[in-house]
Image: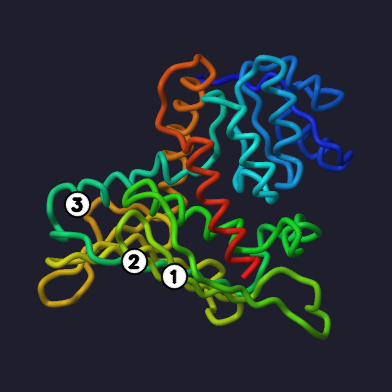
Amino acid sequence: GLVQACGIWDPAPAAMQRMAKTFPQVPRLADAAAVIAASDCTYIASPPASHLEHARAALAAGKSVFTEKPLAVDVADARRFVAEAGTRGAVNFPFASSPAVATIRNWIEGGEIGTPRRLAIEVGFAKWPRSWQRDAAGWLDRPMQGGFTREVVSHFLFLSRRLVGPLHGLSGKASFPEAGPEAGKSERRIAATLQAGDLPVTLAGAVGETAKDDHNIWMLEGDKGAVRLCDWSITERRGADGTWQPAPDALPQAQARPLALRRQLEGVAKLARGEPHHLATLADALNVQEIVEAILAG
């Protein structure tokens, strides 16, 4: 294998019991420090507000760090962390390894859309959190560190930065439930404009306006045509007649995801060895986080 899991720890006993059943071959360790001591590269999959504490401990022990997104929720602390961490960290944005994103990049570089002109991002959810995330609703549906902007929109902001350019010039706002049983929960709608490099970007997201568990479109238009990524993994080109045609080799997310995850692990192995890699850098993730937090504060 590319990597070996040398130990795992979760502060919740129920989670440790689940992992004992699911991954009996992985040693269950006593605490985060024990995982750091056992590893070359520490993977951090805790709720976002605790990412930097674990990451600093791993870096102080001379290890590299692969953390879940978002990088953090405190922007000032994240800026300090990125300034001190150097190149020994990366963030898990799987679009860095996505076959679909490689297709989009090839289309753009092959001149399919001509000169890029504008970018649009749209996400929607029947409910938040999504059905498979309900166990984490305690933090995932709270404004302090949860919400779909941090959890999902961040992926598409990373994609925009990776394929188009650095993110800046944000104007946007988020709407939070104010009354009734929903009060005090994470955002239910966002609307924003920004730029990726020199291109204008529009961004919209909402909960409860689609029947789909998870709907998303990332669309780049140029003066000759347009390309888009739909529902995480389906790439499409707009033909001269205005209709959208999927790529012949487009894969649904269930089939595309394992391919991307394997390539992510190839990047983690390089990160741990101190070699150049294609993963999302800490600087990439900080730029995404700055935009996300500015939307939520809007």
**In the rendered image, the vertical position of residue 123 relative to residue 32, given as above or below:** below
Q: Position of residue 58 (x, y in %)?
A: 70, 23
Q: Which residue is mark 1?
A: 193
Residue indicated by mark 3 = 107
Q: Are marks 1 and 3 in contact (CB under 8 Å)?
A: no
Residue drawn at x 44%, y 53% is 253
Q: In the figure, is residue 64 to the left or right of 94?
A: right
* Residue appearing at x 64%, y 18% in the figure: 63
* Foreground tag (3 vs 2): 2
For the residues labelled 2 and 1, the Cα–Cα distance comes to 7 Å
Q: Looking at numbered disc 2 in the image, what kind of residue is underneath it?
A: Pro
Instruction: Give the SS element for disc 3.
Output: helix
Q: Residues within 10 Å of mark 2 (few under 14, many from 20)?
A: some
Distance Cα–Cα, label 1 vs label 3: 25 Å
In primary-sequence order, the first of circles 1 and 3 is 3
**Residue 278 sits in quarter:** top left
Inter-mark Cα distance, 3 to 2? 20 Å
Q: 271 or 137: nearer the eye?
A: 271
Q: Earlier in the sequence, mark 2 or mark 1?
A: 1
Residue with the mark numbered 2: 200
Percent x, y for residue 55?
A: 69, 30
Image colouring: rainbow
Q: Quadrant of residue 197?
A: bottom left
Q: Is disc 1 placed on a helix, strand or loop?
A: strand
